[in-house]
Image (tube, rainbow, N blue to C red):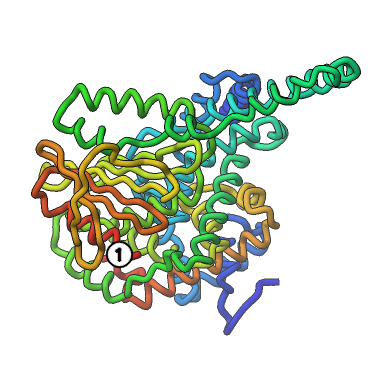
Amino acid sequence: MMKKQNNHISYERLSKYFDGEIAAPEQKTIEEHLRHCSFCSRGLRQFQELHTIAEQSTDPKLTRDLWSDIEHQINLRNKDEYSSFTFKKWMVAAAISVIMLAGGWWLAGEFFDGVKSHNAASVTYVNQFAFDYGLYLSGLDNPKIMKRFNEGYKKQTVETKGTVDSTALQARNRLIKRLPREISVMSTYLLESGCCQGNQFILEHDGQKVTVFQQPQKHPSEFTGYHKKHAKIDTADCSRVDAGDHTALEFDSGESKYVVVGRKNDPMLAAIMHRLTDSR
Amino acid sequence: MKNKMEQGSTESLVRSARNGDGAAFKTIYERYYQPVYRTAYRLLGERMGAEDITQEVFIKIHRKLDSFDFNASFQTWCYRITVNTCYDIMRKQKRRGRYNKGSVEPDFYESKLQSSKGSEPEDNLNRKVLTEIIEDKLQAMHEDLKTAFVLREFEQLSYSDIANIMECSEGTVASRLARARSQLTKYLTKIGIDHSYFNQ
């Protein structure tokens, strides 16, 4: 009944015995064997040791509050579903109206022009979700400007839609792995917009705060109205924007835009940008 | 009895959450986020990814609440969603060649253990290193073996629950668990850690 290899109990049987998943008669046979076999007894002890290590291991702790993000995503989804439901209802009502009134309306040539004029252009929408890096940069020296930036940012997160896109999550994990070791990641944010998702990290080293943004290239975020200077970091051609005591480095990989913001003359900014651009 | 009561209150929470009660869903989150996060962390081997997975799992749970069958255990259902979400991510990472294969050389741990001897408090430190060894080695394991081990040893679930979560038979769970244990103990022996180490 008991499967044996070289007269020893197989790992599977021993493992089941350890977990108490063996029927009573077979259990007795195994116990009898264990009394005389040091090899199998040692195997059993190793299982016990593995179990002890697992049992005594510390549970990992969350580094951020997840609930607010989850709640936000759920609310957005509910809103989408409601909009979609309302839209469908509207479509049905419109279709019925069209059928009922088609006979009379065909005489009114203006109708189709009216429909055309409601084909919404996306320009306003895109501008609304643009991320103004310049505002953020200036806000680091001026709380009023930062307040304005944050208000715009909140508006942006409330009005956007979509779920966490794994491409953005993977981009985030890739970026974190590239950061220099001396840097601590204080917090991370997933930036949502109408067209795509990006990442923001708040980092710290030696008491200095550094912010890193990563946005897909198609995202319309820009340094509106700021003078950009050329900055070469290793082999990468970057732009530099200065405002007050702070500076921002920008690099466009063709796929993503990276912006590193921090104190002027902080060598870590260039080090981070080097790591972000180097390992692509 | 306690489990039944717990299950009962979970059932009413799920029913309320289905009807759009946000507070009820928050209570569900507070009750289950830890096992979800722990499992994701052990399967993926990194905190940030595990946090993202936890977030994704709860959004999925919310979306699928209507399909939950009250005859099943809610906790098992949460575990199943977690494991499947982790599998998706691991497979994507594998396809893109970024899968964490537990690439640390055995020598690294041997020297780490040696250097930890004599430190204070020695036993706790050694246990911590051993946990690191196990967690790292788990990443190199086939995902089915790793999942069976994590659910049994870290989450202390029964064979029947694991079979339910992994959608396989209890016999398959037993076999995967034995293979996982065998690989881990052989690895520990290979790097010079066997039962004598624990008994010193």
The C terminus of chain A lies in quadrant:
bottom left
On the image, the x and y values in percent for residue A234 come to 20, 66
Q: Foreground: B108 or A98?
A: A98
Which quadrant would residue A143 be assigned to in this image? top left
Which quadrant would residue B127 be assigned to in this image? bottom left
Q: Amino acid at mark 1?
A: Asn
Name the residue: 43% across, 74% down: B186
Image position of A189 (left or right of B39) = left
Residue B8 to residue A104: above or below: below
Q: Which residue is mark 1?
A: B199
Name the residue: 26% across, 51% down: A250
Residue A42 to residue A275: above or below: below
The N terminus of chain A lies in quadrant:
bottom right
Name the residue: 65% across, 75% down: A3
Image position of A2 (left or right of A173) = right
Farthest-out residue, right: A103
On the image, the x and y values in percent for residue B103 come to 37, 71
Residue A194 to residue A4: above or below: above
Q: Secondary structure at mark 1?
A: loop
Can residue A96 be seen? no
Residue B118 to residue B7: above or below: below
Label 1, residues with CA under 10 Å away: few <14, some 14-19, many ≥20: few
Name the residue: 48% across, 43% down: A196
